[in-house]
Amino acid sequence: MGASTDPSRMDLHLDGNAALVTASSSGLGLASAKALAREGADVAICGRTESDLEDARATVDAEGPGDVLAHPTDITDRKQVEALVDATAEAFGGIDHVVTSAGGVPSGAFLDMDDQAWYQAYDTLVMSHVWTLRAAQPLLAKSDAGSITSITSTSVREAIDGLVLSNAVRRAVVGTVKTVAREWAPEIRANVVMPGAHETPRIEELIEQAIERGEYDSYEEGLADWSTPIPLDRIGDPMELGDAVAFLASERASFVTGATIPVDGGRLRS
């Protein structure tokens, strides 16, 4: 697909840039990879399930003219994360942009979570992020366009009922990004996006879990409930988050760093 004829392209001048997106075989990570590819970037994606990853590779590849690297990775394993960064740099000759994403952690109340759940959530949400940034930093510092965008959740600003692990643990990602935005400036910009409800497999999973707990009678009832507190009266399309990520990677956002930006249809009141 020629970039100049794509009506969905924002023309963010990412042609030839190299981007790495973690946890990107589905959901908001995949949407971010698609948006970056649509803008002409070469994109590395990763996931644990090779069949899902191959499907995602084909989806991202269809979005733009750049190359796509699909690398099987368990982001809770430091050595695998480091291998992912090395493979991306080798394939594309460097890394210009890193987008950190992670799969969802179990839902439930505080007393439902044992020690292992907390440790696993920390590795999934925080250490995967730390290992990715640590490995990518030298490569980003060499780029003329080095950027980091971390996908968290609106739960880092306002706690969401039944999501204690997300509420508590994701906040460490924001603190990390705010820190490196200062320590690694001016060579590298670093920002956080806080997605609200978007219709991803994760939302489907949360609604199904709530149905099992007896909170909803149907998926439609759950989806309507998630939409109720949103002023725009709907949940988001994942590509709306992906487009925000692509913008933050671009030179159009060259004076934006250390920011924590909601993409939530106006639900946050704080």
Image (cartoon, helix red, strand yellow):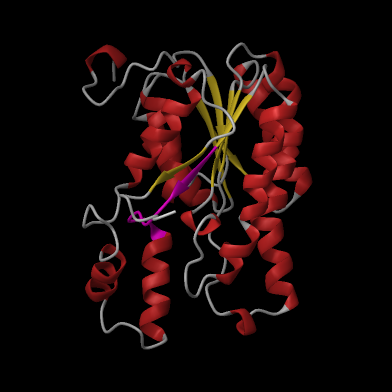
Q: In this view, does 198 lie to the left or right of 249?
A: left
Pick whichever, 223 or 256, lies toward us.
256
Q: In the image, is residue 139 part of the stretch drawn in magenta?
A: no
The relative height of residue 43 versus residue 157 in the rendered view (above or below) is above
Q: Where is residue 44 in the image (x, y as percent from the top left)?
A: 55, 32
Q: Which residue lies furthest to the front in this view?
A: 270
| Residue 197 is a magenta residue | yes
Which residue is located at x 68 percent, y 72 percent? 117
Residue 68 position within the rendered picture, expressed as x and y whole percent measured from the top left: 49, 28
Q: In this figure, what is the number of numbered marks?
A: 0
Rendered residue at 57%/28% (across/down): 257
Q: Quadrant of residue 2?
A: top left
Q: In this view, does 190 lie above or below 235?
A: above
Q: In this view, does 215 lie to the left or right of 227?
A: right
Task: Examine the rendered structure and indicate whether residue 255 appears above or below residue 197.
Answer: above
Q: In which quarter of the image is residue 11?
A: top left
- The quarter of the picture where residue 129 lies is top right
Q: Residue at x 67, y 46 (%)?
A: 175
Q: Kindly identify the residue that appears in the image at 38 percent across and 18 percent down.
A: 65
From the viewer's side, name the closer residue of 132 and 90: 132
User: Where is residue 113 shown, x and y percent of the image?
Assistant: 65, 79
| Quarter of the image where the N terminus is located | top left
| Residue 147 visible in image | yes
Report the magenta residues as a range: 192-201
Q: Is residue 86 visible?
A: no
Coordinates of residue 184 in the picture (x, y in percent): 72, 25
Q: Which residue lies furthest to the bottom in this view?
A: 214
